[in-house]
Image: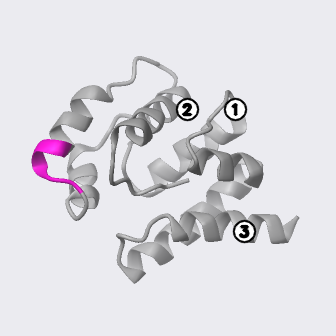
Amino acid sequence: MKQIVVLAVLCVIVSVQALTDEQKAKVKVAAEKCIASSGADPASIEKARKGEFGDDAKLKEFIFCLLKVTEMVDDNADVRLDKIKEKLTKDLTEAEITTLLGKCKPTATIPVEKAAEFYKCYWANTPKRIELV
């Protein structure tokens, strides 16, 4: 099981190539914390990296945790525009970020659902994405 968790964490790190080494280290710690706290199946995380999200409650918990720990959303899963722009500026233009955020406005009210909804939309609408899962 430990090997599977390590593999999932490595997948997260490989997916954040646009980040600095320091940011990658923070994502690694966050991913480990979020895998442990959510109980998400590493196989589900790997599928999510490929855009296969399903309706896995533990995966949604993982996504919410990771977005929260990386400060992309707050405790209510409301998007932190300043942090999103800061993290995506290397990969997307200001116009692309604005378009993305205009499309990805979750309608869910439960934070876990809202975070998962935002991330799915982000994943589907970003050609150059920083894959957090």
Q: Quadrant of residue 125?
A: top left
Which one is in front, 35 or 121? 121
Please provide percent x and percent y for residue 100. 25, 37
* Mark 2 Cα-neighbour bin, 10 Å: few <14, some 14–19, many ≥20: many
* Mark 3 Cα-neighbour bin, 10 Å: few <14, some 14–19, many ≥20: some
The residue beneath circle 3 is 7
- The structure residue drawn at horizontal position 42% and vertical position 71%, both measured from the top left corner, is 17
Q: Earlier in the sequence, mark 2 or mark 1?
A: 1
Numbered disc in front, either 2 or 3: 3
> Which segment is the magenta one?
92-96
* Element at label 3: helix
The label shown at residue 112 is 2
The residue beneath circle 1 is 57
Numbered disc in front, either 3 or 1: 3
Real-space Cα separation, disc 2 to disc 3, in angstroms: 24 Å
Q: Is residue 107 visible?
A: yes
